[in-house]
Image: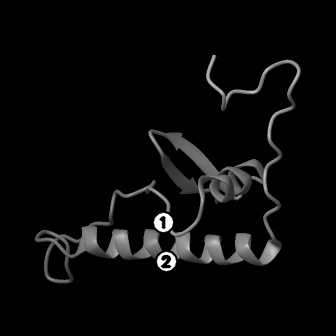
Amino acid sequence: MSETEPTPEQPAPAQPEISKEELRLAMKAFRKRLKLTRLDDESRLGYGPMSSGGKSGVAAIRPPDSYPKAVWLKLAEQGKLRREGGGLYSIVE
């Protein structure tokens, strides 16, 4: 057994407290990244005002690396994001 795994005698390390402000800023960064990813997807040929149109099919993205994984897990636990698997998250509508 490695030293990083908690044993029955040792409690698991406590998760660091995540402030409401940090969660708010993380959600804002997630929305911005999702918006930019969708715009990038729609900017390719075949999407445009003179073509048949079409919307981006991007529904889930990998969250920004500027926030730790614990922040994204907390937002998913609160029901603001949905874990899609493979490290992807989507916004709960």
Mark 2 element type: helix
Q: CA distance from mark 1 to mark 2?
A: 10 Å
In this rendering, the answer to whether 22 lies above or below 85 is: below
* Crowding at mark 1 (Cα within 10 Å: few <14, some 14-19, many 20+): some
Write the residue at 52% across / 42% down: 84
Q: Nearer the viewer, residue 69 or 81?
A: 69
Q: Nearer the viewer, residue 3 or 64?
A: 3
The residue labelled by disc 1 is: 64
Q: Is residue 28 left or right of residue 38?
A: right
Q: Amino acid at mark 1?
A: Pro
Q: x, y (%) of residue 38? A: 35, 69
Q: Amino acid at mark 2?
A: Lys
Q: x, y (%) of residue 72? A: 63, 56
Write the residue at 19% across / 72% down: 47
**In front: mark 1 or mark 2?**
1
Write the residue at 26% across / 67% down: 41
Q: Specify the quadrant that holds the N terminus.
A: top right
Write the residue at 53% across / 52% down: 89
Q: x, y (%) of residue 25? A: 66, 78
The residue labelled by disc 2 is: 32
Q: Specify the quadrant that holds the C terminus.
A: bottom right
Q: x, y (%) of residue 14? A: 83, 46
Mark 1 element type: loop
Q: Quadrant of residue 11?
A: top right
Indicate the colouring scheme.
one colour
In this rendering, the answer to whether 51 lies above or below 4 is: below
Q: How many marks?
A: 2
